[in-house]
Image (cartoon, rainbow, N blue to C red):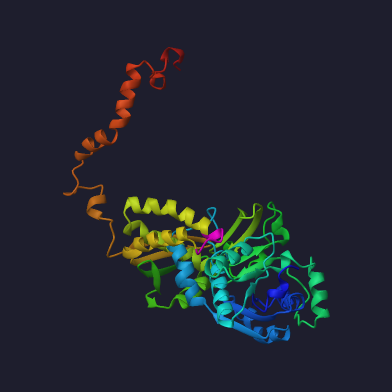
Amino acid sequence: MKGKDQVKKVVLAYSGGLDTSVIVPWLKENYGCEVVTYTADLGQGEDELVGLEEKARASGASKAYVVDLREEFLKDFAYPTMQAGAIYERLYLLGTSFARPITAKHMVRIAEMEGADAVSHGCTGKGNDQVRFELTVMALNPHLRVIAPWREWEIRSREDALAYARAHNVPVAATEKSIYSRDRNIWHLSHEGGILEDPWQEPDEEMFQITVAPEAAPDTPQYVTIDFVQGVPVALDWQAMGLVELLTRLNEIGGANGVGRADLVENRLVGIKSRGVYETPGGTILYAAHQGLESICLDRDTLHYKEVVGHRYAELIYFGKWFTPLREAIAAFVAVTQRRVTGTVRVRLYKGSCTVVGRRSPFSLYREDFATFGHDDVYDQSDAAGFINLFGLPLKVRALIDIANGSDADLTAPDFSKFKRD
C-alpha cells in the first residue's frame, strides 16, 4: 500500500480490547514500524486498565503509556460542556463525544515526544469517533499520518480478529463478546448494538450497569446539595470535594436512585441513524443543578442566548470539532457567563426523577420584593400600561393599517345569528 515504507513509528490509541490488541501486530506486519501504545484513563474503571501495559508489550508494542486524564477531562471538557448547556438532540449529554478530543490530544503529544511519524486508532469506518480522532490530529499536528486499520484490513468479523490474534500469539483474555458495544468513562456509560438495533425494542434491564431501574429505587426521596463557584461544582452536601471525587459520589447517588438514563435514536455525523442508551447519573444531576442556579444568576437576554449557543456547541462537539475557532469562541462566551454563577442548589432525587427544589446565590437577580403578588413599594403596577402600549405599538399600527385598507378579515366579528340558543 502506498506510503507504508514511510512509517517508522506509530502511536496507537489502545484500549486493550480485541481490536486494538490485534492492531499492534497488524501495524508491525503491514507497515514494518515500531508501535507504541497509549491509553487514556478517563475513569473507565480498574477492570479495563489493570495489566494493560503488560498486555500491550505481549502483543508486540515497544512501549506502553497509561495516562490519568480524569481531572483534565472534567475540568477542560466535561464541565465547560455542561456550563454551555450543550445537549445533542435533546437527550445526549455527549460523554463519548468530548472524550475523543482529549484522548487524541494526548496521543498527538506522545507521538511528538516519541518522534513518531504516525498515529493509529481502532475506530470503524461507520461511526463518529474516526472523525473526532482525526480532526483533532489535523488541528494539532497535521504532519502526523493517521492509520485507520478498519478502513484498510481484511478483518471483517470477531472470528477473523480472533484467528489473527491466535496466529500472531496475541493474548486475548476472553473469546465471548457482549451483545452490546459499550463506551465508559467517569461521565457516562453508553450502550449500542444487540436488541437496541431495533428501535421498537425496550432495553433489557440486565443491560444497565450503573443505574438501578427507577421502579426499584428507594421509596423515599433523597436530597443532595451542590455548591458551585463560577459554574464549577466544588462541594457536595456541604463537604468540599475535588472534581473527580464529587462526580464519582454523584454517580453513586444518582445511580442508586435510577437517575440519568436516556434512550434515543440519534443522527450520526456520517449520515446514518443509530440508537444509543446512555447512563449519566452524576452528569444529569449536575446539568439540572447548574441550570437551576443559572435561572437566578443570569439575566433574561444572556440566558436565552445561551440556549441558542448551547445547541450549536453540542453539534460542534458531536461532530468532532472541539479544536476549532468557533468552539473556542463559544467557550469564551460561556466562560464570561459563568462569572456570577456561584451559589448553592438543592436537588430532589426520586425513582429516576431529578428536580431542583431550591437555589440561592449572592449574585441572585431574583428579588422577592419585586416578584411578590402582594403589596410592594418598588413596582408601580400602573406603569405597566405605558409599557404595554409601547411594546405593542408595532402590532397596533399594523392592525390600524389593515383596517384602513379593508384587509382586516382575521378580525371580522362572527355572525351570531347562525348560533341557536338552548
Q: Which residue occupies the foreground of this view, 283 or 41?
A: 41
Horizontal side, residue 340 vs residue 249: left or right: left
Residue 43 appears in the picture as rendered = no
**Quarter of the picture holding the C terminus:** top left
Determine the image quadrant of residue 62.
bottom right
In which quadrant is the N terminus drawn? bottom right
Please name the residue shown 55% across and 70% down the image: 141
Residue 358 at x, y percent in the picture? 36, 62
- The image shows residue 312 at horizontal and vertical percentages of 48, 54
Q: Nearer the viewer, residue 419 or 112?
A: 112
Residue drawn 38% across and 19% down? 408
Q: Is residue 19 above or below residue 363?
A: below
Extreme-left residue of the structure: 377
In-image side of 112 versus 396 (left or right): right
Answer with the quarter of the image where residue 366 lies.
bottom left
- Provide the residue span drawn in magenta: 317-323
Which residue is pictured at 19% across the width and 46% down the height? 379
The picture quadrant where one finds residue 97 is: bottom right
